[in-house]
Image (tube, rainbow, N blue to C red):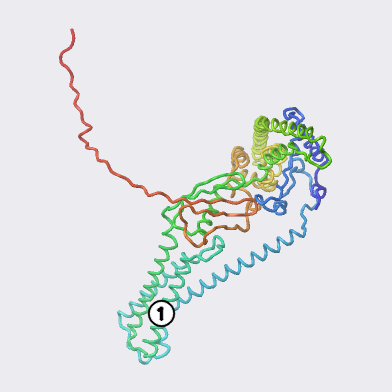
Amino acid sequence: MDTESTYSGYSYYSGRSRGSHRHGERSRDHHKSRSKDGSRSEKSVTINAPPAEPLLGDSSVLGEEVQDDNWGETTTAVTGTSEHSLSQEDIVRITKDLEDSVGLDCRRYFSLTLAVVLGLLVFLTPLAFLALPHLLWPDKLLVCGTACEGLFISVAFKLLILLLAMWALFFRAPRAGLPRVFVFRALLAVLVLLFVVSYWLFYGVRILDSQDENYQGIVQYAVSLVDALLFIHYLAIVLLELRQLQPAFSVCVTRSTDGETRHYNLGQLSIQRAALAIIENYYRDFSVHNPALLTASKSRAAKHLAGLKVYNVDGPENNAATGLAHSQSRAMIAAAARRRDTSHNELYYEEAEHERRVRKRKARLVVAVEEAFTHIKRMQEEEQKKAPGDVMDPREAAQAIFPSMARSLQKYLRTTRQQHCHSMESIQQHLAFCITNNMTPKAFLESYLTPGPTLQYGRERWLARQWTLVSEVSVTSGLKEGAIFLLKCIDFSLVVTAKRIPYIQLSEEFIDPKSHKFVLRLQSETSV
């Protein structure tokens, strides 16, 4: 889909504003960014997807997030123009995602099926031990006394406790799909399988073949199996849950694009499970990744590199003018170097101008939102006097007052390069939420004035369907001192470095309480 079809719903004013934006960009190159015309050019700031580079990922994926950046000026316009299209690359990528999702689902359901089968085998084995003698040789069994009947109650309650414990520990919704199996979980499954098979072999040789008549001994044999299974479940709690609670490593997580860094303490974990814990903490602690903040520095670097030109004057036909050409090229390189030395001044004034515009847009936004919320209070007072059927719900109230603040909010989001993180629908939903819960204008603006964690924004803005774990060692091995691995997604990667928490030696120093006592002596003689 070309650019014209994407912006077919825009007004004529937005088209003129884009032209004034390009004019404003040219004027800023000539150090005239502080003129009054610069404020008009801000109305058409459009953040394009970053170029296709190995660091920022595939541009075709980022291009899907392009939306109408002029919703502040066209909030009342409703058109039937479609802004979605599919290219051949999109179809191939969607097909690949579907194949990956099918593979992950098959693996997940296969693991769940094995867990269910093993759980049924463990739960039904003691019941089978008790039922088979009554089905195969009921006439030969001795009478079960009071002690034997008491064991039935013990087996019943122990099986109920084992069933609840297995459900709580093993049958939980999976948080993620790991590239390799969880070693401890696989070892426990093998241990339980071998344990149950061993009990079945002993039961078949010593009880089924001989048709043992002592039914109380058979019941005690089943009780011993249930007790052993409870101890194995306790071992599973220690290996799967308690072992990782004590911190053993401090990991440093750095985002490759903007260098944002966080530190976390982790226990004895494998690399893949440590990566899972880091990704969960990333969505909670890191601010949302904003590629638009990186475009300014890239454009500034490209502009300075474009000013440096080198000519080849050593051709076969330029022997007479070689000296003059060399002198001209050296003068041009020196001029470019001097111009490059003044780039820090340009950066200083650009940042100062940007901060001034942000403060200006913020002040206008705060005033507009406060006026809108004041209007809401007046509407609520008027609606209390109306009939119950005529009362406006929060969604309709949000749609009614949104156009009064939409323009100021759009300009602020464009100035801070956040317009791709907030759609018009999400802003209206947040406004309706604030109206429903009787929140203040400051509470409404907090989501836009202060960049929040990644989970604060819509899932389509940040959710990476698949992360790639890159490690030089096996991902099932444990963390070690100096271990380094990468977590890659579409736009960026997380570089993780592990350091072992040092051993701390504390010493005790005893202070005698009597050493703090002192005597104050006053002289009785005074001067006359």
Residue 280: image quadrant is bottom right
x and y, in percent, of residue 312 in the image: 78, 40
Amino acid type at circle 1 is Ser
Q: Residue at x 45, y 52 (%)?
A: 249
Indicate left or right for 169 with 412 as reference: left
Where's residue 174, x and y in %? Answer: 54, 63
Residue 391 at least partly seen = no
Quarter of the image with the C terminus is: top left
* Left or right: residue 30 compared with residue 484: right
Residue 452: horizontal and vertical position, in percent?
Answer: 58, 44
Label 1 residue SS: helix
Please name the residue that numbered disc 1 is placed on: 198
Write the residue at 37% across / 90% down.
211
Viewer-nearest residue: 33 or 20: 33
User: In the rendered picture of this protein, how many numbered marks are placed on residues?
Assistant: 1
Q: Nearer the viewer, residue 334 or 33?
A: 334
Q: To which quarter of the image does residue 100 belong?
A: bottom right
Q: Residue furthest front?
A: 320
Judge whether residue 121 can be spotted in this image: yes
Residue 345's spot in the image, x, y percent?
A: 66, 29
Q: Nearer the viewer, residue 225 or 183?
A: 183
Q: Say left or right for 290 vs 514.
A: right
Furthest-top residue in this view: 528
State the image quarter where residue 235 is shown.
bottom left
Residue at horizontal 47%, vertical 77%? 121
